[in-house]
Structures are given as structure tokens and as C-alpha cells.
Amino acid sequence: MTTTPVTTARAPVSTPQDTATKVWTGPGFGEFVGIVALMMAVTAISIDNLLPAFPAIQARFGVPDANSLQLLVYVYMIGFGAAQIVYGPLSDTFGRRSVLLAGLAIYVVGTGLAMVAPSFGWLLAARVIQGLGAASGRVLSTAIVRDRFAGREMASVMSLIMMVFLIVPMIAPAIGGAMLLFGSWVYVFVSMLALAGILILWFAARMPETLHPQYRRPFSLRAVAQAVGLTFRNRVAVGYATALGLLTGCIMGYVGSAQQVFDTGLYHLGNLFPLAFGLVAGAMGAATLLNARLVRRLGMRPLSHAGLSLFVVVAVGQVVVGLAYHGHPPLALFLAILAANQFLISFAMPNFNALALQPLGEIAGTASSFLGFYTTALGAFCGYLIGQSFDGSVLPIGIGYAILGSLALAVVAWTERGRLFRGGVSG
């Protein structure tokens, strides 16, 4: 492997950090996974623990349309997606540590502004700033893993990280609900601030710089353009990133609609809303753990292709059930089908993320940045369409899953030139 910027998009035969790995002085494997997972968990908890506070926020600011509260999720994702363009190139020049800590400082500022918001518009602006800061964790968690691992080992590590990341939604609404017991939705943001503080202290104390000095790239528009061109000319990177973005749209559509589906708009679970939300998230966490165990043996492609194919089948069944019950199936049946789909999607998303980055090891930061922006923007847009289609039934979620899942499967088939379910040394 050369030390100069690559001109083709071949997968590296080894991790770009081979030299650094031999003298690794950072945390052990378990702690490494914990730190990086927490970087991603900040993103998840910043979305999900706010959901139980929607009614309180609506009452506080007099928001006339309940669907408008979904903007608290989607504007966060706008900031989150847009900022990813910046963090990757900066981290390829200045290293991962300093850029992450700067991003977390922005997140803290946004959280503080949300706590003192005098209007709904102010709160939305604060959520954008939160997203701008949280994007650093999304980009750099992936880049740090790619700095140290490659191939199926990278996919396994990403699955473990995603498992922790997906466990957070199981407890995040419950944390948000508990914060409301203190008397105000403001305390939900206090919990976000506390989590960010833990991450800042833990990362600063224990995680060394993972970007090897010989792979630092000059920060210039020409260098960034070269890396972006290399990224988006790669069929595998673009294809799997597109499929990941479409599946992210499924998740975002569900998250944006969840409070209305389970609480105020359909099933009226009240205080049991976090339990229902956690059960579905638990299915995702279990699948991600299983994926981490199976991916080393079966490979990323066969496992993710099978998961996506079954996801589409179940999504079509979800639509059929929704139609059969006129958009209001029994809660237990809806939860079972939804959990099955979340279980299956979790065999695709972590592996798609790893497959998209696999050919781009020498520009992992910039590649993660722009692919992250692309997948987040695509996912937020698709999720917004699903969420804003909420009509008091479960049909928008089911139809959204079926359409986006089918599109993702078609994109993967294009990416692999029709050769699905076939693994290889690196995938």
C-alpha cells in the first residue's frame, strides 16, 4: 500500500493503520468499542429521549399541529447531515481527537440553547446546532474504526458498536419520561448534556489519536475534491451508501411517527409508550449482536442481502395486515411485525456501512464524512415523507417500509451487477 493518495478505489489488503496498530497504547477492545459506541449513542439519545416530551413542548409553545413536532427530529437530522461534510476532511488533516472534541463543544452549546428556548422556533434552531455538533461523533466513530480495522473484522466491530447504539433507543424514551417527572421538558436536555460530558471526559482521557501521521491529507479544496471524486466514482461505495440511506429513511419515518402511533394518535399507551418503543428497539439490538457473531463466518454480503430481502417480504406483509385492519391492527400484532422488520433491517445497515467504506481506507475520514452526509440527507428526506404522511393509521409506516426496502434491494442488485448473496475475502 502506498502512502500517497490512491487513484483507484480498490479495497486495501490491510488496514491503513497497520504500523500504528503494532504500537497501540489506547484502550483494550471492549473499552474501545464502548467509547466509539457512546460517540454514536449521543446521536440516538438526542432524538429518542425527546419523544415523550412532545406533548409538553406542544403545550408550552402552543404548537397547533402535532405533526409539526416531528420537526424536532428532522431539523436535528438536517444539521447532523450537513455538518458531516466538514468533519471528515478536517479530521483527515488535523486528526480525529481535536475535531471530535470541537464537535462535542458545539453540541453542548446547542443543548444549552435548547434549555433556555423562549419559543418553538428558538428550540428548532437549537436542535439544528445540536445536530451540527453530534455529526462529529457519527463521522469520526466510523473513521476511527476504519483506522484500526478492515474487512469482516471491521464489520464485526461495527456491529458491536451498532448494538450498543441501538440499545440506547430502548431506554432513551424511558429516560426522557423520567426527566419529565422533574416537572419540565427542559430536564430532557439535561440528560443529553450529562451524556455528552461523560463522553468528552472519557474520550479525552483514554482514546489516543488513531490517524497515522503518514495518512494525514492536506486541507485544501483540491484534496477534498479528489477524495470526494474517488468516493463517488466507486460503484460499491455509492451503491451501498444509497441503500443505507433508504433504510435510514425507514428508521427515521418510524421514529418521527412513533410518539403519535403509540401515544397520542392511535394506540394511546401513555406511560407505556417507552416500553413499546423499547421492545422494537430491542429487536434491533438483538439482531445487531447476532450479526456481529455471524458476519465473520458468513460474510457481509450474504448476510446483509438475505436480511434486506426478508425485510422487503415482511414489509409487504405489514402493508397487507394494515389494510386488513383498516390501518389499526391489534397492538400485539403490529408490534410483532414491526419488531420483525427492525430485526431484519439490522442485518443490512451495519454491513452496508462497512461495505461502503471498505474500498476507501486511505480517505476514511473524508469518505465517511460525505457518505454520511449523503445517507443522512437521503434518510431524513424519506423519513420526513413517511412521518408527515401520518393519518392516524399504521399504513404510512408499512407502505414506506415496502417502497424504500424494495428500492434499496434494487440498488444493491445494481451495485453487485445482479450477483447477490455472494461473499468474498473482504465481504
Image: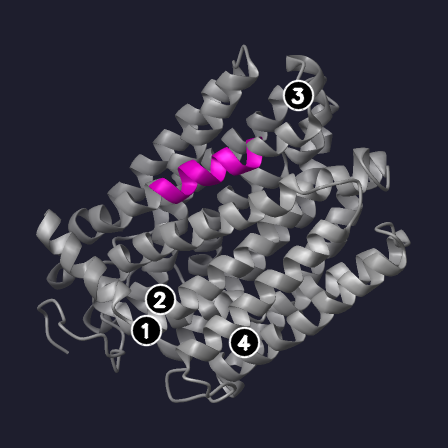
Q: Secondary structure at mark 3?
A: helix
Whole-percent x, y for residue 316 in the image:
72, 68
Q: Which residue in the protein does label 2 denote?
A: 238
Q: Is residue 81 magenta?
A: yes
Task: Return the disc, 2 or 3, that comes first in the chain's sequence.
Answer: 3
Q: Residues within 10 Å of mark 2 (few under 14, many from 20)?
A: many
Q: Is residue 126 magenta?
A: no
C-alpha span from label 4 to label 2 = 16 Å
Task: Return the disc, 4 or 1, that comes first in the chain's sequence.
Answer: 1
Q: Residues within 10 Å of mark 1 (few under 14, many from 20)?
A: some
Bounds of the magenta segment:
72-82
Seen from the viewer's position, the closer of residues 348 and 40 is 348
Indicate which disc residue 304 carries: 4
Whole-percent x, y for residue 33 in the image:
46, 60
Q: Residue at x 13, y 72 (%)?
A: 7
**Given contact means CB atoms under 8 Å apart, are the residues at marks 3 and 4 in contact?**
no
* Type of the residue with mark 2: Val
Looking at the image, residue 199 sits to the left or right of residue 259; the answer is left
C-alpha span from label 2 to label 1 = 5 Å
Seen from the viewer's position, the closer of residues 175 and 5 is 5
**Given contact means CB atoms under 8 Å apart, are the residues at marks 2 and 1 in contact?**
yes
Judge whether residue 62 can be spotted in this image. Answer: yes
C-alpha span from label 2 to label 3 = 39 Å
C-alpha span from label 4 to label 1 = 17 Å
Indicate which label's residue lies in the foreground, 2 or 3.
2
Task: Return the disc, 3 or 4, that comes first in the chain's sequence.
Answer: 3
Q: Which residue in the protein does label 1 denote?
A: 235
C-alpha span from label 3 to label 4 = 39 Å
**Dominant SS in magenta:** helix
Q: Which residue in the protein does label 3 denote?
A: 57
